[in-house]
Image (cartoon, rainbow, N blue to C red):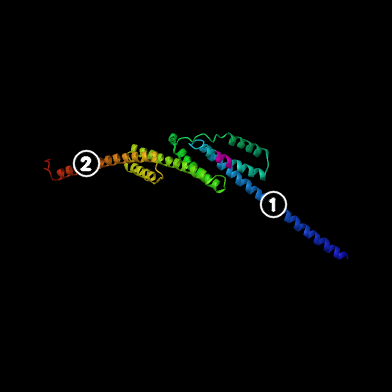
Amino acid sequence: MLYQIIILLIAILIIAGISASAVQQHKERKESQKREVLNRQRAIIEETENALAAASQMPVSQQLISIIQRRIHNSLQRSLQQSPNQDLQQKLKDTTAIIKSIDMTKPAPDHNSFKLPANDKVIIKYIQAVKKLRVILRSEQGKGNITAKVFSNEDKSLERLQLRVNIETLNKRANEAMNGKQQGSARQYMEKAVNALKLHKPQDEYTSSRIAEFTKSLSGLENDMKESNLAQIAAEKENESDGIDQLFGPKKKW
């Protein structure tokens, strides 16, 4: 009888140990999942806040600003579900107030107001920011947070802005090449700009006027290059003629 009781107690201890281990593993797994969710939401918030900071320097609509702010709002809510704390609650409250203050009736800024930054590093960040905003838009549409119509309108607007950044960057480089007497490089930049403009659909006032301007500049550049080549050929022939005259002309008496 005592032997059976001992066996039973041992079995109970083993089962209790296994159960405790299972509970601990489950708890650790839940904590790990919570950390993963929090880290993912933290990354989304940080990425979106960076995009928002960039968007504030661009001619974008209030609709887009609202979409970005709501993305931050949604991530804050998910974070609070995993780890309620005062800082997150305050940030959620602030974001809610910002969203309510957005004037959706305010017209989007005219893209003609866009000015290319002078610094190349800033230009690169600008291009990256526009691309990131388009990725965010696509993500929000995939989650069902915005309609297909809103996505289409905002993505097309960003596409036009991205085109302007690229074209004005090529124009800047073409001008720098011209100033550096690098006519071949300047022509390549201009031709690349014209090709990009022609591929854009639908054509608008900006693309049409820019194509005309670049085409005119290319024509002038071609004429300048032809004149330069003719002048170079003439100079080479003159040098060649002088060499022949020296070779076969009357020899000087010493």
Left or right of 167? Residue 11 is right
Quadrant of the rendered structure where residue 76 is? top right
Callout 2 crowding tier (Cα within 10 Å): few <14, some 14–19, many ≥20: few
Which numbered disc flags the more N-terminal residue, 2 or 1?
1
Q: Which residue sits furthest right?
A: 1
For the magenta stretch, what is the residue range?
A: 66-71
Left or right of 42? Residue 158 is left
**Residue at 71 percent of width and 51 percent of height:** 27
Distance of mark 2 from mark 1, alpha carbons? 84 Å
Quadrant of the rendered structure where residue 180 is? top left
Left or right of 198? Residue 220 is left
Callout 1 crowding tier (Cα within 10 Å): few <14, some 14–19, many ≥20: few
**Residue at 61 percent of width and 43 percent of height:** 74
Q: Which residue is mark 1?
A: 28
> Mark 2 belongs to which amino acid?
Ala
Of residue 12 and residue 199, the one placed in the foreground of this image is 199
* Spot occupied by residue 181 in the image (x, y as percentages of width and height): 32, 39
Of residue 186 and residue 237, the one placed in the foreground of this image is 186
Quadrant into which the N terminus falls? bottom right
Of residue 215 and residue 18, the one placed in the foreground of this image is 215
* Spot occupied by residue 188 in the image (x, y as percentages of width and height): 35, 44
Q: Is residue 217 above or below residue 3?
A: above
Q: Which residue is mark 2?
A: 235
Residue 47 on the magenta span: no
Task: Please tell me whether the stretch drawn in magenta is mainly helix, strand or loop.
Answer: helix
Instruction: For the residues labelled 2 and 1, say whether their Cβ atoms are less than 8 Å apart.
Output: no
| Helix, strand or loop for disc 1 | helix
> Mark 1 belongs to which amino acid?
Glu
